């Protein structure tokens, strides 16, 4: 969060401990940040206890989430493509703005073409042969979790024409943070073919509706997650919630609900605990205290890292990366 000074989170993904870390930027006192964290845990536990995974409905959502969902209803794929492209020498090309996109190298473009060729094999019986043919390829800047990882946006032929073209997101999958620290992962894990296959499987299980054209491809030493960029995908802008405690609390409730519903869908899958056992576990209190303590440690670590980075940056000891 701090490294790019962002003030927005994606609804489907929630590292709730960010409430504590972002409290200064949102003008929230430490006491209130802690109250929000506890509210998240209470809402999460209550939804797990209900044992019924749902999804965020436009008609039932409240606050900024309702505003966001209603605005997305009017968005079309054509509008998304028009916003992300421009005409150059009579040809449709991705707009390179230095904020959302950067120019891709020749080698990167070649690798992405090969990745999409593999991905196209999955749809060879259902989509036109030229559907995944790239028209243009660029590096994509999106999400803190993608920092330092390859990520691309690709304008593909699709069904043809402005109404038929698609934007594809191609992102290199990284190992789970827990898996890279053995002490935090004592339970045996499924034997995934590669990291993108792991992400794909979990996404399909935990999401009520997964993104269109979702797939995973192994290419060289790495693997990549592929999906269509949706015109109805966006984020809740926390900057607009600055100082609005009740509004922020509404967003926190939605985040907690989405997390609980996703975890419920994962119960009993790939060796995970069943729904009843999971519901009994979250009714306890020890895990909540542990998570609060973990969030405190994470807050302190993030702030230390940010101060070290800022000091190095001010003294010109940081090699500037164009993507940042």
Image: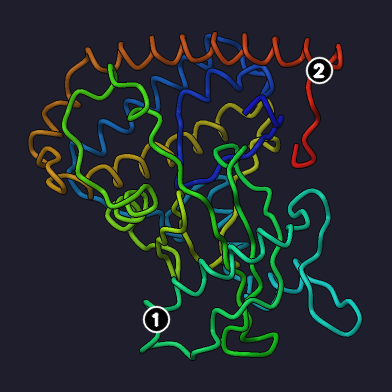
The quarter of the displayed image where residue 50 is located: top left
What residue is at 23 percent from the left and 50 percent from the top?
Answer: 265
Camera-side residue of 324 and 283: 324
Spot occupied by residue 122 in the image (x, y as percentages of width and height): 37, 77
**Where 256 sits versus 33, above or below?**
below
The Cα–Cα distance between marks 2 and 1, rounded to whole angstroms, is 47 Å
Which one is earlier in the sequence, the residue at label 2 or at label 1?
Answer: 1
Spot occupied by residue 252 in the image (x, y as percentages of width and height): 47, 34
**Where 222 sits versus 144, above or below?**
below
* Mark 2 Cα-neighbour bin, 10 Å: few <14, some 14–19, many ≥20: few
Camera-side residue of 64 and 145: 145
Q: Which mark is residue 123?
A: 1
Residue occupied by mark 2: 313
Would residue 169 be found to the left or right of residue 277 on screen?
A: right
Would residue 122 be found to the left or right of residue 242 on screen?
A: left
The quarter of the displayed image where residue 308 is located: top right
Contact between labelled residues 1 and 2, with CB atoms less than 8 Å apart: no
* Mark 1 Cα-neighbour bin, 10 Å: few <14, some 14–19, many ≥20: some
What residue is at 69 percent from the left and 66 percent from the top?
Answer: 137
The quarter of the displayed image where residue 310 is located: top right
């Amino acid at each position: 969060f701090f490294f790019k000074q962002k003030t927005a989170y994606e609804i489907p993904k929630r590292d709730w401990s960010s409430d504590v870390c972002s409290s200064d930027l949102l003008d929230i006192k430490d006491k209130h940040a802690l109250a929000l964290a506890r509210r998240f845990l209470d809402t999460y536990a209550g939804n797990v206890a209900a044992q019924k995974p749902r999804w965020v409905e436009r008609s039932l959502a409240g606050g900024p989430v309702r505003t966001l969902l209603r605005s997305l209803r009017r968005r079309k794929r054509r509008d998304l493509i028009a916003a992300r492209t421009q005409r150059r020498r009579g040809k449709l090309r991705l707009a390179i703005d230095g904020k959302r996109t950067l120019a891709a190298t020749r080698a990167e473009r070649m690798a992405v073409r090969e990745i999409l060729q593999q991905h196209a094999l999955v749809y060879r019986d259902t989509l036109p042969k030229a559907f995944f043919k790239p028209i243009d390829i660029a590096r994509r800047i999106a999400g803190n979790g993608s920092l330092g990882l390859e990520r691309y946006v690709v304008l593909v032929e699709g069904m043809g024409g402005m109404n038929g073209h698609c934007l594809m997101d191609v992102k290199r999958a990284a190992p789970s943070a827990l898996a890279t620290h053995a002490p935090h992962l004592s339970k045996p894990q499924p034997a995934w073919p590669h990291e993108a296959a792991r992400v794909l499987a979990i996404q399909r299980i935990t999401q009520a509706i997964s993104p269109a054209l979702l797939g995973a491809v192994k290419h060289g030493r790495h693997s990549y997650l592929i999906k269509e960029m949706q015109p109805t995908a966006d984020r809740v802008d926390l900057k607009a919630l600055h100082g609005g405690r009740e509004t922020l609390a509404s967003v926190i409730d939605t985040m907690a609900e989405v997390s609980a519903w996703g975890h419920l869908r994962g119960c009993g899958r790939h060796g995970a605990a069943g729904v009843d056992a999971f519901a009994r576990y979250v009714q306890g209190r020890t895990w909540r205290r542990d998570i609060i303590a973990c969030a405190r440690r994470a807050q302190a670590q993030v702030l230390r890292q940010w101060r070290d980075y800022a000091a190095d940056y001010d003294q010109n000891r940081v090699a500037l990366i164009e993507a940042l």
